[in-house]
């Protein structure tokens, strides 16, 4: 049967709509090849003559039979295209409260933006040992499939978590790791699986931030490799990170925040052990107030710092080293508040001798204040024949100050990741591994189309 022969009376189709993206319609007159319009009836009983053109306006997408709508695997649909995918996901989410749907070996997840009680240990145990299609779609089913194939085929596995900002990638990756930590618990009392999970609150504190689309958005990419021994117990892990958004340290768009750790420290500034940090409310620091909203609804930054510190302790970071981390973080906030004053000539600037924030910055890092004051407003130029010092304008000095803040934060971030990896490292020989890649990707439709193209199913 040729394509145009499918467009007969009573057949339902999807047509593009500027408001609803896709709108359902029913054909009320058989279409014949060469016709320039398709006669349709919309769901509100109004009629429409839908123009058909060989290039600009092809025949609309056909709608799936109602009996197929709500399928838990998109590949079971008669027609797999954008409106069919979106409608099926909408029906499952709104009518059945299902956030997960398969598309062959791909798991499609809809972020409900609320906590669901479907990730407990009893749910993990229910999916453990099951085949991927035997139970409702779930991140645990994908994790179990990876674990089972690793053990059965003795081949390393990887799970790719892709999607746009706010899609829920980081949370999905975290639940996958929780599954492996539960079913592949360590063979001894080293609690390595607890250490693997403890890395999450640390990395969220130093690498996640509130954006306009996501209150807990990862601003870096990460690949976590979980190692197993011959009995498929977890023996260790290793994390690689890339593309940290350093610019966020010194600038945030409206209604966005800097990295969580800064707000956690400011919210805990009254603690006796933090007295030397000389911190106050996040509203009083440039680097934490540019977005003009320091709070996240439902989030207690002081309580989150407790979790961050507990996680650092779990990974063997001594209290003295934790305080060093917090001192460096606090010094960055003080650096952002250092006042740079332009001179009348417009080509040079200076910092007030009694600038308290410069004093705290230098005190926390053990830097000579006079030297810092000098080099924040000047730069050294080296030529083949001589070296000389040149004054910087106000704008140049501000840029240099912000560059220094980003540089310090990036190096501290790398140091923490290195320390986390040391805590997760094992001398036991690794037999196999499962990798979890949390990566920014394309939108859902593009991802599914490319998966089909490469015969992932």
Image (cartoon, grey):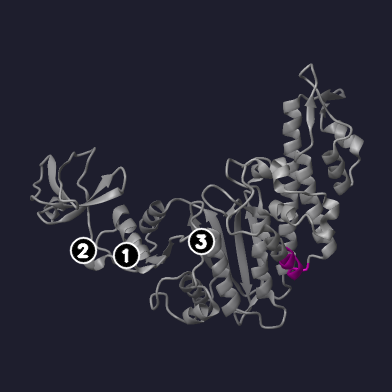
Q: Is residue 26 visible?
A: yes
Quarter of the view holding residue 369: top right
Would you place residue 453 above or below residue 181 in this image?
above
Q: Is residue 126 magenta?
A: no
Q: Position of residue 397 (x, y in %)?
A: 76, 30
Looking at the image, tell me whether mark 1 or mark 2 is earlier in sequence order. 2
**In what element is the residue under mark 2?**
loop
Q: Please, which residue is most extreme toward the top here? A: 345
Instruction: Estimate the x, y position of residue 108 in percent, counting from the top left.
Output: 42, 62
Residue 135 placement: quadrant: bottom left
Rendered residue at 14%/56% (across/down): 11
Q: Residue at x 58, y 41 (%)?
A: 254
> Crowding at label 1, few (<14), some or many (≥20) Cα neighbours within 10 Å?
some
Checking the image for residue 65, the label placed there is: 2
Residue nearest the observer in this picture, 436 or 96: 96
**Does label 3 or label 1 sit earlier along the sequence?**
1
Magenta span of residues? 309-316
Distance, label 2 to label 3, CA atoms, is: 32 Å
Question: How far separated are the C-alphas under marks 3 and 1?
Answer: 20 Å
Numbered disc 1: secondary structure = helix
CB under 8 Å between callouts 2 and 3? no
Judge the density around disc 2: few (<14), some (14-19), many (≥20) Cα neighbours within 10 Å. Answer: few
Looking at the rendered image, the quarter that the N terminus falls into is: bottom left
Q: Which residue is mark 3?
A: 160
- Alpha carbon of mark 1 to alpha carbon of mark 2: how far? 14 Å
Q: Main secondary structure of the magenta part?
A: helix
Residue 208, compared with residue 142, is above or below; it is: above
Residue 75 tag number: 1
């Amino acid at each position: 049967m040729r394509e145009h022969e499918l467009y007969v009376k009573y057949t339902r189709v999807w047509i593009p709509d500027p408001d609803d993206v896709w709108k359902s319609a029913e054909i009320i007159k058989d279409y014949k090849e060469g016709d320039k319009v398709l006669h349709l009836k919309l769901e509100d009983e109004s009629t429409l003559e839908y123009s058909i053109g060989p290039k600009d306006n092809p025949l609309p997408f056909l709608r799936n039979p109602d009996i197929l709508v709500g399928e838990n695997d998109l590949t079971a649909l008669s027609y797999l295209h954008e409106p069919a995918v979106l409608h099926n996901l909408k029906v499952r989410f709104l009518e059945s409260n299902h956030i997960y749907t398969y598309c062959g070996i791909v798991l499609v997840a809809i972020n409900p933006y609320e906590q669901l009680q479907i990730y407990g240990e009893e749910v993990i145990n229910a999916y453990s040992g099951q085949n991927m299609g035997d139970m409702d779609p779930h991140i645990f089913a994908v994790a179990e499939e990876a674990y089972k194939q690793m053990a059965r085929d003795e081949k390393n596995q990887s799970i790719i978590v892709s999607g746009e900002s706010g899609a829920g990638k980081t949370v999905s990756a975290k639940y996958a790791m929780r599954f492996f930590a539960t079913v592949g618990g360590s063979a001894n009392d080293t609690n390595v699986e607890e250490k693997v999970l403890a890395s999450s609150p640390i990395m969220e504190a130093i690498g996640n931030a509130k954006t306009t689309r996501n209150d807990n958005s990862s601003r870096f990419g990460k690949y976590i490799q979980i190692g197993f021994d011959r009995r498929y117990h977890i023996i260790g892990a290793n994390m690689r990170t890339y593309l940290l958004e350093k610019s966020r340290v010194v600038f945030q768009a409206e209604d966005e925040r800097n990295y969580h750790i800064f707000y956690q420290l400011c919210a805990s500034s009254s603690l006796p052990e933090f007295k030397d940090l000389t911190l106050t409310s996040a509203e009083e620091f440039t680097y934490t107030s540019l977005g003009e909203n320091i709070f996240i609804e439902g989030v207690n930054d002081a309580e989150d710092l407790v979790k961050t510190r507990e996680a650092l302790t779990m990974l063997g970071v001594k209290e003295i080293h934790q305080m060093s981390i917090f001192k460096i973080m606090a010094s960055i906030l003080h650096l952002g508040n250092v006042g740079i004053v332009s001179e009348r000539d417009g080509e040079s600037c200076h910092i007030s001798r009694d600038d308290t924030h410069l004093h705290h910055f230098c005190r926390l890092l053990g830097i000579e204040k006079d030297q810092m004051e000098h080099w924040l407003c000047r730069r050294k130029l080296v030529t083949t024949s001589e070296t000389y010092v040149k004054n910087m304008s106000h704008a140049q000095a501000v840029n240099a100050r912000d560059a220094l803040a980003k540089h310090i934060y990036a190096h501290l971030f790398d140091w923490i990741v290195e320390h986390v990896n040391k805590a997760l490292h094992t001398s036991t020989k690794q037999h196999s591994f499962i990798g979890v890649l949390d990566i920014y990707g394309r939108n859902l439709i593009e991802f599914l189309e490319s998966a089909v193209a490469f015969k992932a199913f």
